[in-house]
Amino acid sequence: MFSTKSFDSGKICISDAIHTSLSSCLVRQLQEGFARLWRGTNAGLALAVPTVGIYLPCYDLFRNWLEDLTAQNIPGATPYVPLVAGSLARSLACATCYPIELARTRMQAFKATQTGKPPGVWKTLLEVLSHVRSTNNVQNTRGYRFLWTGMGAQLARDVPYSAICWSTLEPIRRRLLSLVGEESNGLSVFGANFSASFVAGSLAAAATCPLDVAKTRRQIEKDPVRALRMTTRQTLMEVWRDGGIRALFTGVGPRVGRAGPSVGIVVSFYEVVKYALHHRYATSE
């Protein structure tokens, strides 16, 4: 569902059209080189490990703390605990790891030169900083701020995403685990978490697709002055003017197709590891 439009002498691609299919997009990428389909994979791995390492444990901590707090003071607010805990945990993880997310998006958007390999994570970040410092209109003291360009759009996407995801995931997961009862094992824990996470991740990805489009637009903006001045609302309005409602949901199919399995795999393996460690600790006593 992506098509590309060239800016800045063909170095950057923006997914702002909606009339081509995912298959035609894959064919175009293959024509530019098979390895391009994995552009930004090292940045993705560098991003995934610290993000998950911060996100999921912090969610558990916030959820447990808020459940105790609401149970004692506001019992009626307990169902909303996953929403708040997921939002807080995602905000913390996003702010910490955002420069790597910026590098990954730029590595995936920029075309490789004919003479060399695409830049890596750190080289991409250094190029961003050097480009900003060479621009007379941007003060050097604001250079590092550019590494967090578009974080507002990222938070505007990820906070609602996490709120929807965990609010959906927790009731489904608890219902499935209650069917197993005391006879739960590693396989049932994996199955319940994967099923609940798959549904929740797919639903959240579809609902927040316009915010993902806005985030990508801001991250791949080449003009540092304009990038620092762009807002999520302004970007969404530009996308709306360019292509209407369909443009806001550009790429919703691939996004949902990726989010469901990825959330399912990450959450289910995390919960299985927790279950195994807890079981091992309980049997050793």
Image (spheres, rainbow, N blue to C red):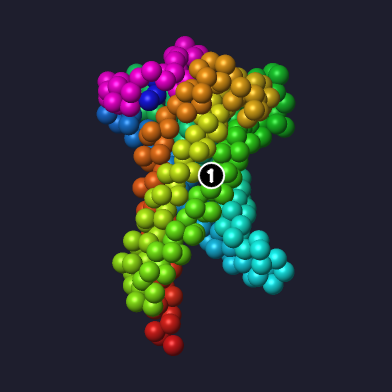
Q: Give the side of residue 48 with respect to residue 229, left or right.
A: left
Relative to 208, residue 172 above or below? below
Amino acid of disc 1: Tyr
Snapshot quadrant of residue 190: bottom left
Residue at the spot x=66%, y=34% of the render?
145
Residue 8 x, y percent position in the rendering? 50, 14
Residue 238 x, y percent position in the rendering? 59, 19
Residue at the spot x=30%, y=31% of the render?
35
Question: Considering the image in quadrants, where does the N terminus appear?
Answer: top left
Residue at disc 1, secondary structure: helix
In the picture as drawn, the residue positioned furthest to the bottom comes out as: 285
Residue span colored magenta:
4-32
Q: Is residue 29 magenta?
A: yes
Q: Give the side of residue 191 with respect to residue 233, left or right.
A: left
Residue 100 x, y percent position in the rendering? 52, 40
Question: Considering the image in quadrants, where does the C terminus appear?
Answer: bottom left
Snapshot quadrant of residue 133: top right
Residue 176 x, y percent position in the rendering? 40, 64
Q: Residues within 10 Å of mark 1 (few under 14, many from 20)?
A: many
- Along the line of sight, the residue nearer the viewer: 250 or 136: 250
- Along the line of sight, the residue nearer the viewer: 149 or 196: 196
Residue at the spot x=49%, y=60% of the render?
171
- The answer to whether any part of residue 271 appears in the image is no
Q: Is residue 114 magenta?
A: no
- The answer to whether any part of residue 231 appears in the image is yes
Q: Which residue is mark 1?
A: 161
Relative to 164, residue 236 above or below? above
Please state the total of marks drawn on the protein image: 1
Residue at the spot x=28%, y=26% of the render?
23
